[in-house]
Amino acid sequence: MSPPEVPAATSHASAFGGLGSVYLAVLFDCMGAMMVMPLLPFLAREMHGSPFAIGCMQSFYSLMQIIGTLVLGTLADRVGKRKVLLVSLFCSSFFLMAFGLATTLWQLVLFRGFNGFFAGTVSICQAIVADATDAEHRVGKMALIMAAYGVGVVLGPGLAGLLAPWGVLAVCMTASCCTFLNFLLAYFQLPSGAKAGPKEQETCEQQEEPGLPEDESVEDLGAWDTLQRLLALLLSDPVLSCVLWLNFLQELTMGAFMGVTALLFADVYGITGGGLGEIFCVAGVSMVVFQGLVVKTLVDQVGRPTSIMAGSVIRACTYAAMAALELPLLPWLAPVGIVAAGALIDPCTACIASERAPSGLSGIVLGVFQSTGSLGSFLGPVLAGALYCVWRPAPYWAASAASAACIPVVMPLVLHHRRLRREELKAAEGLQGASGDSEVPLLGPLDQLFNQAHQTTGARREHPGNFAGGECL
């Protein structure tokens, strides 16, 4: 069946309407989570929790987030993204309130874990944006998600610092109210068309997918068949595999950073919960500014893989500085460097992952993408807590090594991107004439592997021979 003349982006836009409510969902959800984050270590210490216990509490949150994103991502593709998003927001609001009423350490861990299960709203929002935009504009829309996330990072800790004198309950109740307001905004503003609709999408862009008959949609497949298709996609697409590894390593370092940095700042610099909220607020402002003024221009100039590599280098150096130095300005400068590097990394990896997803699997693929990050966030705090008990700088040396390990992972993507750019330049300059040399491909074995995977995974691209459909990298 040949696709109609209506562009896919136009059809999706009419189906989903404006994306403003999606960005608001990310903003308020992040703001509610970040309001509680700076106070967690201090609250656990009041209940006689060790650094290792604090790390375990953070890790349990991420473990439940891994399970939740997989479950919610699968449900989003089957029953609709809007329904799953609304349930997640409502439950997050409830468990934030319950967290504020906790009186024992095990209650903190339990309610924090339930909150983590329903914290997969970002991947659902990313899937909605990916379905509603074309490849040319997708990186900008994904960057807006990260900008909304950054605004939440700014407002959440700032409000927590202002409310800290009134106690943890006031902070948690405010966070719960913010998330419930998010639920109301999504309920009234998010269009009901924000659901996975492979049957509807076939009218816009028909694509044969491996193992999926022409008259069968993803909604008709069982959970086991969906899992089999997902595993086949991961095994056959080296690009997606690289992105998942990158996401895991980056979130591993961030988990370590978030798990013990509050303890480091308190033990070395005497910074309390209110001061930590101010530090996160400054870091969030820098993320928003960097995202708006630098990231899009830099990505357009050097490409997404190079941007990811630059962010990895910045994080490796920043973690090493936190391990080796004790400077008065370090508590303010280090988080700025960490989040600025994240502004270079996160939108690019999320965009590549979304563009590698076949039709109808964007929710589960982005759910797996977030779950790999949640796995890193699960391991990071507990490992950092154990290392912190042995030697205070150890978690940051380990985080620096993990960030440096991202460089060899992303290097094949960088080299492939540069080869494609050279090919495009030569074609534009007319250097590929009708001679026999023009028939010799410019791509090496690695590029051929990437392109073969690109064709077999059924990804939707304008130019199937390119590594990323013209715009993925």
Image (cartoon, helix red, strand yellow):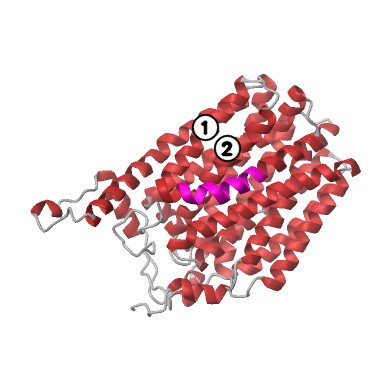
Give the residues drawn in magenta, as a range: 285-298
Q: Distance between the residues labelled 1 and 2?
A: 8 Å
Q: Is residue 382 visible?
A: no
The residue tagged with tag 2: helix, strand or loop? helix
Residue closest to the eye, 54 or 447? 447
Q: Where is residue 292 in the image (x, y as percent from the top left)?
A: 57, 51
Residue at label 1? Answer: 402
Residue depicted at 83% across the width and 30% down the height: 48
In terms of depth relative to the viewer, which is nearer, 68 or 275? 275
According to the picture, the residue beneath numbered tag 2 turns out to be 252
Residue plotted at (47% across, 62% down): 137
Q: In this view, does 316 lie to the left or right of 165?
A: left
In the picture provided, is 263 more to the left or to the right than 467? right
Amino acid carrying mark 1 in the image? Ala
Kind of residue at disc 2: Leu
Q: Quick one: label 1 or label 2, which is nearer the N terminus?
A: 2
Q: Quadrant of residue 399?
A: top right
In the rendered image of this protein, does residue 417 appear above or below residue 222?
above
Q: How crowded is mark 1: few (under 14 residues within 10 Å), some or many (20 or more)?
A: many
Q: In this view, does 8 lie above or below 240?
A: below
